[in-house]
Amino acid sequence: MTDGNEPGRTPRRASAGMILAVVAAALLVCCCSAAVGLLISWSAGLFHTPT
């Protein structure tokens, strides 16, 4: 009977650095897509005051 800690076998757990990298990448994608959407809206004239 083994407890799952065989020699030479590392546990399958993500490191804190990897988790932070994934979160940072997700925030970067969200911010960039929001900025592109605002730029498209601005260029389409949605934020201009009607004259």
Image (cartoon, rainbow, N blue to C red):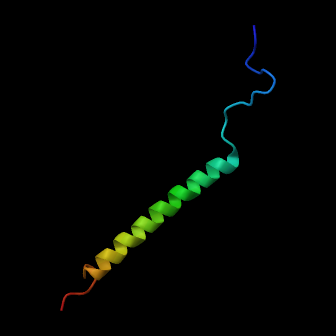
Q: Which residue occupies the extreme front position in the image?
A: 8
Horizontal relation, residue 24 to residue 33: left or right: right
Q: Position of residue 11 (x, y in %)?
A: 71, 30
Q: Nearer the viewer, residue 33 or 47?
A: 33
Look at 29% across and 81% down and name the residue there.
43
| Image quadrant assignment for residue 35 | bottom left
Horizontal relation, residue 2 to residue 18: left or right: right
Q: Position of residue 31 (x, y in %)?
A: 47, 66
The image shows residue 49, relative to residue 22, as above or below, that is below
The image shows residue 43, relative to residue 8, as above or below, that is below
Q: Nearer the viewer, residue 20 or 50?
A: 20
- Tell how many labels: 0
Q: Position of residue 18 (x, y in %)?
A: 65, 48
The image shows residue 12, relative to residue 38, as above or below, that is above
| Image quadrant assignment for residue 6 | top right
Say which quadrant the C terminus sits in. Answer: bottom left
Q: Which residue occupies the extreme bottom position in the image?
A: 51
Q: Which residue occupies the extreme top position in the image?
A: 1
Horizontal relation, residue 31 to residue 37: left or right: right
Say which quadrant the N terminus sits in. Answer: top right
Look at 25% across and 82% down and name the residue there.
45
Look at 57% across and 52% down and name the residue there.
22
Q: Which residue occupies the extreme right position in the image?
A: 7
